[in-house]
Image (spheres, helix red, strand yellow):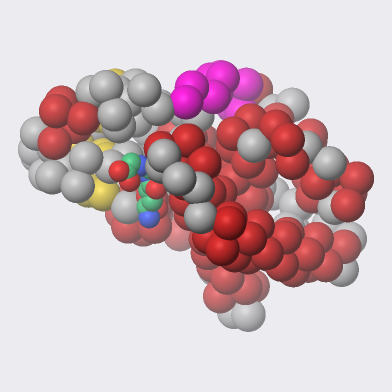
Amino acid sequence: MMLIGQYDSPFVRRIGIALSIYGMPFDHQPWSTFSDGHKIAAYNPLMRVPALVLDTGDTLIDSHVIIDYLDGLVPSEQRLYPKAEPDRHQAMRITALAAGFSDKAISLFYEQVLHSEVSPLWVERCTKQMSNTLKVLEDSRQSLASPYWFGEGIGHADIAVATSLRHFTDAHPTMANWKSDFPQLARHLAMLEEMPVFQEISQPFIAPA
Ligand SMILES: N[C@@H](CCC(=O)N[C@@H](CS)C(=O)NCC(=O)O)C(=O)O
């Protein structure tokens, strides 16, 4: 398998971490969505990452779809979503909130960097959507005593939240005070960033050029 995209993307990094935890060998092409857009287009006409090129030649896109595919390759007891309800749908909800948070963080970044005239309305909307989501995630994490969101072992929800928070911190340094407002999330991020797999599947943030 070949994973396309840079690890400063929360979505790409999430896939790289899941592949590593699952022990699945893969090649990595750290292509930029902007300067390497033409190379990505050969695999994904949307020129977006992550894209996972399978050994069959098929290409999967969208992190949720890729995770679903990878989960289907491992025995159910190894999968990084809980098996039993209600934990399973609750973990998917946390993962979707983290992914949606990153959608807004990326949208805000593009608004501020790529548009010649920044829309205050859009900036305010994204900022509000992001802070609302951080509050929901903080309250959820606060309510749980377990080391990880859904028990004793790391799961997709943990990974998605951590990769989203790391991307947010790097891409929006002027908003770095989130850690004092959301201490449970700050603790979660610090704990996961210390893990060898998070240190290995990592790169500094590079703004699109
Ligand atoms: N829903 C997608 C979002 C992926 C996404 O936003 N990727 C960004 C990089 S972090 C991208 O490709 N941006 C370039 C573009 O949208 O044109 C997923 O979960 O994989």
Of 129 and 5, nearer the camera is 129
User: With 173 as the anchor, is 186 left or right in this view?
Assistant: right
Of 115 and 45, nearer the camera is 115
Residue 6 at least partly seen:
yes
Tell me which residue sits at (23%, 23%) in the image. Answer: 36
Of 92 and 155, nearer the camera is 92
Measuring from the top left, give residue 174's x and y in whole percent. 73, 35
- Of helix, strand and loop, which mostly describes the magenta segment? loop
Of 159 and 39, nearer the camera is 39
Quadrant location, the N terminus: top left
Displayed quadrant of residue 15: top left
Tell me which residue sits at (59%, 79%) in the image. Answer: 85
Q: Is residue 172 above or below residue 128?
A: above
Measuring from the top left, give residue 152's x and y in whole percent. 75, 52
Tell me which residue sits at (40%, 27%) in the image. Answer: 208
Whether residue 118 is in magenta: the answer is: no
Tell me which residue sits at (41%, 39%) in the image. Answer: 116
Measuring from the top left, give residue 146's x and y in whole percent. 83, 57
Q: Is residue 67 above or below residue 25?
A: below
Residue 55 at least partly seen:
no
User: With 60 as the anchor, is 197 left or right in this view?
Assistant: right
Q: Which region of the structure is painted magenta?
A: 197-207
Quadrant location, the C terminus: top left
Measuring from the top left, give residue 65's x and y in whole percent. 32, 57
